[in-house]
Structure formats: C-alpha cells, structure tokens
C-alpha cells in the first residue's frame, strides 16, 4: 500500500501511533524471550533484568535495550546496571516507582524515564525519543504536507517538549543539538505543562525562559549564540523574552527574592522543644502516619515550603541560603545529635529537593571547585563518597513528591561534593558553610547581568 495515498482517518492513526507512543519499562526475570526482545528492538519497551544473587536475593542486574550496529541494523543487547547511575539509585531507593513505569496507561514518570534513557545511552544503546518517532512520521515532505494543522502542531510541541526536558534536566549538549537543528523552537512556549527536575510543573515558557527561571547561566549563553547566529532579529526577540521574566530588571528581582527568603525560626523552635521520643519517631521516616506534634509540624513545614516553591516562576536560591545560615543557631540550640540530624536532613535536605538541575549538579561537583578554582560545571549528578561510612550509592536522585525517603528525609547534599549523613560528634563547618553557595549565587547574578548588558537591555 502506498503510504501517501492513505485516507485521512488512517493517516491520523498512523501519525498518532508513530509520534505519540512511548516505550514502557518491562521487568524481566533472568532472560528475555524472543517476543520480549522484539518489543525492545521495535522501540516499544526497555528492560530491567532481575536475577538471583549468591545469597538467594532477587536483584536488578542488567539493562536490556536496542543497539544499532555499523551496518545500520538493530539488535537486542544487555549491559550490567551501573551502580553509580542515578537510575540505579532510584531503583534501589524507590522501588514503588517501577510499577507505574511498566504501565502504558499510567501517567509517564518523566524523571524516572529520563535517567533510564540516560543509562541506556551510556551503554551506546538506542533511545526511542518522541523526536525519533516524529522524524519517522515526517520523514518525507510529502507526508508532512498531508498533515493537517493539528498534526503539525503535535510535531512542533513534541520537539519543544524534548528540548525543554533537556534544558530543565541540565543537559546543554543535547539542548544545543535540538536548537541548532530547529532554531525556531527558541520562539515557542509550551502549552502543556512539563515536569522539571524537582517535580515542578513548568508551562508557558520558551527554552530560553526556562533556563532563565532555573538560574542556568551556561544554558542561556549557549542559546544566546543561536539567537544571534540562527534567528532573524534574534537579539531583539531575546530581549523581549528577558523582559518577560525580569520586567523590572535583575537587581529588583534579586531584592524581591532576598526579602521573600523562607524563615526557619518556627520549625527550629518546634524541634528544640520536642521530646526525644518524638524526635526518634520523626527520624523513622517510614512512619508516614505518625501524629505527634513534631511530625505534624514537619508536615506543615513541607506543605508550606512546597507551595511557596511551586508558586515562584523564578527559582529562589535564598531559601536554601537561609536554611544554611540558620544551621549554626540550630546546632547551638539543639540538645541532642538526633535534633541536629533531623534539622539537617529533613529541613535543609527538604529545601534541596526543590533545586533546579544545575544547582544539584553544582553541589555534586563541589561548590568550592566552581567558585574558587573556577572549574566548569561538569553536568553530573554523581556525588563522591570520600568516607567509608558514607552510603555506597554515589548518585543522588530527587524522590517523587509523595516519597518519604532519600534527599529531604534520610540525608542532605553538602557543598563539598558528597551527600549523606555522617554520625560524627560535631558538624564540620565546611559542610554547612554558606560562603560557597553565596559565591555561586553571585556568579549567576553576574552572568545574567552580563547577558543583559550584552543585549543592551539596560539602555534607555
């Protein structure tokens, strides 16, 4: 049958199937069947393979994916799961997220699939992005010409979604590839919400504005070049996008954020006054239904902070700075090590759950390396484990909003390039020193200011 002579209703079906279906996760015991392997090669699934170790325990051991060879052929391949990858960390710490990933009808866990596909790409496997299915649907201009306006919009929205995801997950290399291939994406705003790295729903932003709101200076600088080199009147259009985010200028925005910084006095006071029994119960984060006054106060704090964070279009780093600044006072006021642990992990760590990708990447690398040694941002989520008593898992992932494990409950990310909770008698001042974070924030302000000035936005 000639594809170009398909009736419109069948063309709609073909287009929707090619452009909208996405792979699901399949959990395989020991070895995939030929039928299961065929689904992977066809782009309908990815595999996580479960095996039994020498102790008789069932463990996730391998990935199953499609691999493209030099002759252009696709074949099923497997590779050991990298125990240092974010996806492996997610599997171990949040097994409840696996189930929905296997259900094609469940809301897609953008975060989990992003890092699953990242792990597959690390093994040189094929990732069936929406972009690839769009290319297949529009491989010929004749086919694209047959698309009705709604189909064409679906193509563009799909391309924009991929680009925004790369921006929001701190991957400038892939974002640049997308934007150089289709520079006009810089002028489009997403009409459907996209979940960013922290779980926040982002809508009605261009890729450049999304990077601005996340505080990702390097990403913005990359886009600035594309505006200038690939888009007619690009500088003017970029200025307009700047002004939409910072209508009163950067300085006014910074002052507003500083004034709005979260006040942690109330939760510190509650922790100070809580009996040891409530402190101990609160540290057992699996006890979700604990009705003690302390646990209720912590829940109130979490709900309040999440509401504030989600309401802010531009990420406000001064919330985290205020949390770090409150730590010395909290440590001095607290009578027990358990109180200090609770504050650091479930207050400071919880605030860190709402950091954009570029900030988490900076913490992973070590803020001092970036601010004092002027090293470039490596764009990795892998934290170092410099002490034997640290957790064996070295990649940090942000738990889903409903989860009571991981960052914000069991541990926090230190500014020294590693995370966890060390059971020492004192808190090392370098762990909670606010200077690296202050300097890091200042470099971002300077970067955006330079970007502003280079575009003559401050000229009267």
Image (tube, rainbow, N blue to C red):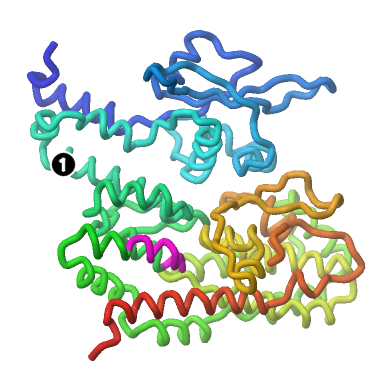
Residue labelled with disc 1: 150
Residue drawn at the location 51% of the way across and 24% of the way down: 65
Where is residue 157? Give x, y as percent.
26, 46
Residue drawn at the location 73% of the way across and 62% of the way down: 345
Q: Main secondary structure of the magenta part?
A: helix
- Residue 212 figure quarter: bottom left
On the question of residue 456 being in view, the answer is yes
On the question of residue 293 being in view, the answer is no
- Residue 223 figure quarter: bottom left
Where is residue 182? Give x, y as percent.
24, 48
Where is residue 392? Give x, y as percent.
78, 44
In the rendered image, the quadrant that contains the C terminus is bottom left
Determine whether, in the image, residue 155 is placed left or right of residue 339.
left
Q: Residue furthest bottom?
A: 460
261 relative to 207, above or below: below
Instruction: Sort mark 1 into few (<14), some (14-19) or many (20+) by Cα contacts within 10 Å.
Output: few
Disc 1 element: helix
406 relative to 31, above or below: below
- Is residue 233 part of the magenta span, yes or no? no
226 relative to 157, above or below: below
Residue drawn at the location 23% of the way across and 70% of the way down: 235
**Pick the front one: 368 or 150:** 368
> Which region of the structure is painted magenta?
213-223
């Amino acid at each position: 049958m000639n594809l170009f002579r398909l009736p419109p209703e069948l063309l709609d079906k073909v287009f929707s199937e090619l452009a909208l279906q996405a792979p699901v996760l399949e959990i395989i015991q020991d070895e995939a069947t030929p039928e299961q392997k065929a689904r992977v090669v066809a782009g309908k699934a990815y595999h996580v393979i479960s095996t039994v170790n020498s102790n008789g325990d069932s463990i996730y051991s391998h990935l199953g994916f499609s691999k493209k060879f030099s002759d252009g052929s696709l074949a099923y391949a497997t590779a050991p799961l990298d125990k240092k990858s974010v996806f492996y960390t997610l599997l171990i710490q949040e097994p409840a997220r696996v189930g929905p990933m296997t259900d094609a009808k469940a809301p897609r866990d953008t975060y989990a699939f992003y890092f699953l596909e990242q792990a597959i790409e690390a093994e040189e496997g094929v990732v069936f992005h929406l972009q690839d299915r769009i290319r297949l649907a529009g491989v010929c201009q004749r086919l694209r010409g047959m698309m009705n306006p709604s189909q064409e919009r679906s193509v563009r929205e799909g391309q924009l979604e991929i680009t925004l995801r790369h921006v929001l997950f701190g991957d400038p290399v892939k974002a640049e590839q997308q934007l150089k291939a289709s520079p006009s994406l810089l002028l489009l705003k997403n009409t459907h919400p996209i979940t960013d790295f922290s779980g926040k729903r982002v809508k009605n932003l261009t890729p450049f504005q999304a990077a601005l709101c996340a505080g990702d200076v390097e990403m913005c600088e990359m886009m600035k070049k594309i505006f200038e080199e690939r888009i007619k009147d690009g500088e003017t259009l970029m200025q307009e996008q700047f002004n939409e985010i910072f209508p009163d200028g950067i300085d006014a925005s910074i002052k507003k954020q500083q004034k709005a910084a979260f006040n942690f006095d109330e939760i510190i006071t509650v922790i100070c006054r809580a009996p040891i029994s409530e402190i101990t119960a609160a540290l057992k984060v699996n006890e979700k239904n604990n009705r003690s006054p302390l646990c209720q106060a912590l829940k109130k704090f979490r709900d309040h902070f999440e509401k504030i964070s989600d309401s802010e279009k531009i990420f406000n780093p001064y919330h985290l700075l205020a949390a770090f600044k409150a730590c010395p006072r909290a440590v001095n006021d607290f009578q027990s090590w358990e109180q200090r642990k609770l504050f650091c992990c479930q207050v400071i760590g919880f605030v860190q759950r709402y950091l954009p990708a570029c900030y988490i990447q900076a913490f992973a690398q070590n803020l001092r390396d970036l601010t004092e040694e002027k090293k470039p941002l490596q764009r990795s989520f892998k934290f170092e484990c410099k002490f034997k008593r640290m957790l064996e898992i070295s990649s940090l992932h942000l738990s889903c909003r409903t989860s009571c494990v991981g960052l914000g409950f069991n541990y926090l990310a230190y500014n020294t390039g590693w995370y966890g909770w060390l059971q020492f008698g004192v808190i090392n001042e370098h762990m909670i020193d606010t200077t690296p974070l202050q300097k890091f924030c200042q470099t971002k302000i300077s970067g955006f200011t330079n970007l502003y000035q280079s575009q003559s936005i401050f000229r009267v």
